[in-house]
Image (spheres, grey):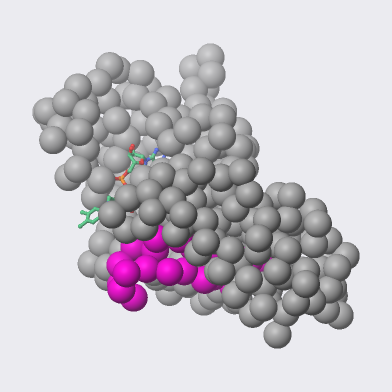
Amino acid sequence: MLNLQTIHKPKTLDQALRLAREPDTAFTAGGTGLISEKRRAVRAVIDLSALDLAFIETRGEDIFIGATTTLATVADSPLLREIADGVVAQAAHRTHANILRNQATAVGTILSEPDGIFSVALSALDARLTLATLKDSRVENGDVSLTDLFAQRGTRLPNSIITEITIPASALARRGVIETVARTPRDKAIVSVCAALEMERGVVRAGAIALGGVAETAWRARDVEREMLNQGLSDDVIRRAAMAAPSGLNPRGDFRGSAEYRIEMARVLTARALREVAK
Ligand SMILES: Cc1cc2nc3c(=O)[nH]c(=O)nc-3n(C[C@H](O)[C@H](O)[C@H](O)COP(=O)(O)OP(=O)(O)OC[C@H]3O[C@@H](n4cnc5c(N)ncnc54)[C@H](O)[C@@H]3O)c2cc1C
């Protein structure tokens, strides 16, 4: 539990970032993570919900999801249901129960569950994030890919606010498939795989394979992605891709599944996803 004494509700990014300079503060979006927050030191939260960051829109051919857009809105978005066979909308729908999806936000979910199915689907579409920070007392916007953010900065961003997620136009040309394994259909996925490939007459021209539940954050099987370029998805190509997808990973086992089970499932689900893309 937090030792919570103050809730700020700033109306501008500038105000929010200034408040974050105070010690013992943390951002909150949907706020559902506060229930399990263990940092006793946090005495004030900065609620991001009045910053006008709840939207789904296109600019040019790119698609933008505002940071505080709820998972329910993402899941129901006609636009996102179209992109790459709707993998991002499906992933939002499969994250949490209905009541929590109405409150939990897109960015809050990425940061709380970096290896979860929503992060995996976004990673497979090469999603990027816009990060607002204060530099010389002015708000500056930076841009970072989801995978680089996890690799370089982790999931605690005390002095930056993620304002939006960009799904680049390249996603429009991709076929997308998500495969998961869970103890029950409504339970959190133990392992998830999202394949999002651009196909031309049966040949892979571009795309990505992202895995969840096998590393601390969504994992891109980049060697496999390179190997598959300009190849047809024959049984042999799929078998080799599936074997190699979790190479070098050493997942942590838990009550949902052991490390060995996770590696094996990553292979099975990669093969399933690629067979589905090839249909
Ligand atoms: C019943 C219940 C079940 C849950 N089950 C799970 C589960 O299975 N797995 C799991 O991982 N979590 C779970 N949670 C925790 C949490 O609710 C979810 O992960 C949820 O998706 C977080 O979304 P949120 O918008 O509420 O995030 P918040 O709680 O508002 O924020 C989460 C974190 O992200 C930061 N943050 C949020 N938005 C931004 C932004 N725009 N810029 C910078 N930092 C930001 C916050 O500072 C905080 O550290 C559960 C919670 C409840 C109440």
Q: Is residue 28 left or right of residue 107?
A: left
Q: Give the range drawn in magenta.
A: 177-196
Q: Position of residue 136 (x, y in %)?
A: 53, 14
Q: Position of residue 225 (x, y in %)?
A: 74, 56
Residue 170 in sight? no
Against 193, residue 201 (above or below) is below
Q: Which residue is drawn at 34% across and 62% down?
A: 188
Quadrant for residue 146, please give it.
Answer: top right
Query: Which image quarter holds the C terminus?
Result: bottom right
Q: Residue at x 32, y 24 (%)?
A: 19
Looking at the image, which is closer to me, 154 or 133?
Answer: 154
Q: Where is residue 117 in the image (x, y as percent from the top left)?
A: 46, 60
Q: In this view, does 45 lie to the left or right of 261?
A: left
Q: In this view, does 144 lie to the left or right of 28?
A: right
Q: Position of residue 111 (x, y in %)?
A: 41, 43
Examine the structure image and report whether residue 182 is included in the region drawn in magenta.
yes
Q: Residue at x 30, y 73 (%)?
A: 184
Q: Residue at x 39, y 63 (%)?
A: 189
Examine the structure image and report whether residue 191 is included in the region drawn in magenta.
yes
Looking at the image, which is closer to me, 119 or 223?
Answer: 223
What is the total number of numbered labels drawn onto the structure image?
0
Query: Which image quarter holds the N terminus?
Result: top left
Q: In this view, does 25 lie to the left or right of 269?
A: left
Residue 252 in sight? yes
Looking at the image, which is closer to me, 33 or 278?
Answer: 278
Point out the residue furthest to the bottom here: 279
Against 247, residue 242 (above or below) is below
Against 202, residue 91 (above or below) is above
